[in-house]
Image (cartoon, coloured by chain):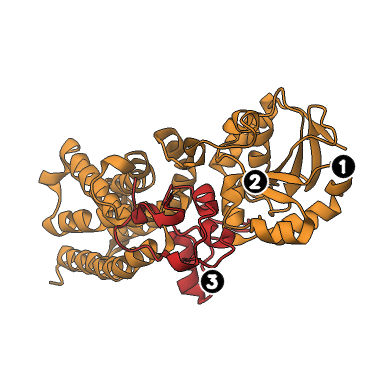
Amino acid sequence: MPVVSTRISRAEYWEHVRCRISGFRHSYTVKPGLYAAGRPDERSEVLVTANYKLSFDSLRKELGGLDVWILVLDTKGINVWCAAGKGTFGSDELINRLGAAQVGSVVAHKRLILPQLGGPGVSSQKVRQTTGFSVSFGPVRAGDIHEYIKAGCKATPEMRRVHFPLVDRLVLTPMELNPAFKMYPWFALLTLLFFGLQPQGIIFRDALAGGLPFLLLGVIAIISGAFLTPALLPFIPFRAFAVKGWIAGIISVSLAMQMTALHGHMDALLLAFSYIFFPLASSYIGLQFTGSTTFTGMTGVKKELGIGIPLYLFFSAVSVILLIVYKLGQWGVL
Amino acid sequence: MKYLANIVSLELFPEKCVGCGLCVEVCPHAVFQIKDKKAVIRDRDQCMECGACVQNCAFGALKVDKGVGCAAALINGMITGGEPSCDCSGQGSTGNCC
């Protein structure tokens, strides 16, 4: 039986950081099965978790001083809540894993403690009917597990609530910025091509001189949608994320325009383009954050998309038309 | 923080409820409370449609259109015509998860 430490090593801290900023998270797993923390015996509680190592580690680092079993389900390397939503942290996997790990012969009781957020995937009555094990839903946060067990497996209402404080939102922003910035080189290339393109060919000097302000505005739109919107989420008015992203975008773009004195120098068509396109991009990127929050439901996001997508397409088309008119004017065609 | 008002698909059928309180236990947003030995919806707009209550109600007293509240997943589903998926489980994922 593997015994796990309740300390996180320096190397693991670094791995946790990598999970927060890159695709490293997709292969950060532990082997499903039964583990021991402390010196558990046949009367010790069994805590169930996912095989995403970041989830497993957030549980085991809270287990100092406890003697418990940890049953790790095969959730394909996904955290408890997401896996429960998809059903991989689910009744069937739990039932199979209880058998495969022979939990029934390791402990003399029939109790399991599941993380509360496993609820969407696990039906407690199905598990009890099939295996005889009774499921107690423990606290949302592993940090409350000591108190929960001490209280005789009773959670306070506060232990049952999911919050979404600033620090929780901030740790998610690198993985909002990351995919947005992956698109940035394409945006930059198109911008430089657009400004460099002249009847004589592609002029490098024009590409840079004309394109630079827009490369800057592109960065601002990404930061506004992927960082400012999540960070300032409760303080930006309105509940729709597309609206929040747009508000963050229009303010950021306006401030950038004022600070760089671009207002006075920019062609009216390009100015209109900037004020339409970049807040729109910020809105779209901000809307993506719905996938990372702890409180957005599918029906609401569907409604946002139903209204949002036609608007995104329409104003993107308007943006392109403005650019074409500007270019034709520049070439003296119009 | 609350998401859009008056849109949640959650339904409670009081005649089927026996007041076991499991929905109060699994709900991460304290949507339910027990009143006169039956569950009542305390704050609808807090519901995020995770489906934990429905999954654990042995009496069929709850119904919700369960799914991921994730724009990337829903857009993916629209493009591919399949189930909403943010491709969280790896291989070529663009990052956003659930």
Q: Which element carries disc 2, helix, strand or loop?
A: strand
Q: Colour of chain A?
A: orange
Q: CA distance from mark 1 to mark 2?
A: 19 Å
Q: Residues within 10 Å of mark 1 (few under 14, many from 20)?
A: some
Kindly identify which chain the residue marked by label 2 belongs to: A
The residue pinned by badge 3 equals B83
Q: Colour of chain B?
A: red
Q: Residues within 10 Å of mark 3 (few under 14, many from 20)?
A: few
The residue pinned by badge 2 equals A136
**Quadrant holding the N terminus of chain A:** top right
Q: Which amino acid lies under the numbered mark 2 shown in the image of this protein?
A: Ser
Residue A30 in which image quadrant? top right
Quick check: marks 3 and 2 in contact, CB under 8 Å? no
Would residue A82 be seen by someone viewing this image from the given angle?
yes
Q: CA distance from mark 3 to mark 1?
A: 40 Å
Q: Is residue A310 left or right of residue A130?
A: left
Residue located at (60% from left, 61% from top): A86
- Residue A106 - label: 1
Residue B14: give x, y in percent of width and height: 43, 64
